[in-house]
Amino acid sequence: MDLTAAVAGPREPFDAQAALAWLGTERAVLLAALRQARETGLDRQAWQLGWALDTFLYEQRHWHDEGVAWAVALRAATALMDGPAVAHAHRFLGVVAGRLDRFAEAHTHLRRAAEMCRAAGDRPGEAETEYVLSYVCWLQAEHERALEHAQRSLALWTELGHPGWEGKASNAVGWYHAQLGAPQQALHHHERAVALQRQAGDPASEAVAHDTLGRANHDLGYYEVAADHYELGLRLARAMADPILEAQLDIHLGDTHQAIGDNASARERWEDAYKILMNADHPQASDVARKLQTIRNPPD
């Protein structure tokens, strides 16, 4: 059977909630299928399934399972002698190790990915590795190092003329400027990211850029502008039927409403976010519940 062949016939409309529910129910089965694919020599399928599961495992915070999936994918890619796939697996194993506070392991994987990319003359791979290194440094609270890696990634993607990744890297540079207490510098990079993602036709990344641009404006006290960007991001998230991204934007829009003293609107946004996250069995639901509690029972 050709697993890459297109499926003929009409397609049902995509139901994100049903997909999340199915993935949650079948998570153990899918991980077992991943291992079995590797054990029976279906290395290409094992590598692809490991990658396909990543977003779900990350967003649901099943980070140990995410690491298991990428470890199997690394063995499969190595068996295939697929250098770019091996480097990609090392990158993601670095990300997972960073999330689990195993920073020495994270940097070992990322160093290996960088070495492989440079040896192969893989400039996009090198640029992506710099981007991931910035994230791991941020997890370590080393914001200056994170900014340096993000700037290197941005320079490489700009040179390569890839607007989608250039936008992601620009957004990261803006985020680290904000973390270092420079929201005014962050604004330029977030605005650039919005424009680049629109050019690239990537509504998900554009919505994320609107979110970070909203947060930078919020930090500067430009609350109306911040709210406008959150609303733009929400429209994109809803059009894509991306409930988790929609919930994130609702949370931040609620924060802005609270900052201007509009507790009723803040409550409405947080309640929307809470419903979405609860329906998805998302761990962040408890954080939003605490926000709602402060609105219902304000401190004396």
Image (cartoon, helix red, strand yellow):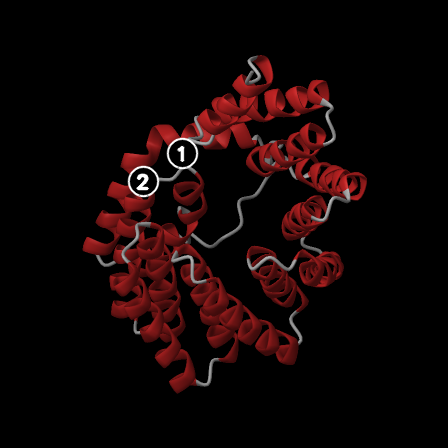
Image location of residue 258, percent across then percent down: 68, 28
Q: Extreme front residue here?
A: 300
Q: 137 or 195: which is nearer to us?
A: 137
Task: Say left or right for 227 vs 63.
Answer: right
* Residue visible at 52% across and 75% down in the picture: 124
33 to 187, vertically: above or below = above
Type of amino acid at the residue the image marks with label 2 = Leu
Name the quadrant containing residue 45.
bottom left
Q: Which residue is mark 2?
A: 30
* Residue visible at 28% across and 42% down in the picture: 31
Is residue 82 visible in this depiction of the protein? no
Task: Tell me the tag on residue 282.
Answer: none
35 to 73, vertically: above or below = above
Q: Residues within 10 Å of mark 1 (few under 14, many from 20)?
A: some
Q: Are marks 2 and 1 in contact (CB under 8 Å)?
A: yes
Disc 2 to disc 1, C-alpha distance: 8 Å
Task: Say left or right for 58 vs 131.
Answer: left
Task: Tell me the tag on residue 23.
Answer: 1
Q: SS at mark 1?
A: helix
Image location of residue 251, percent across then percent down: 61, 32
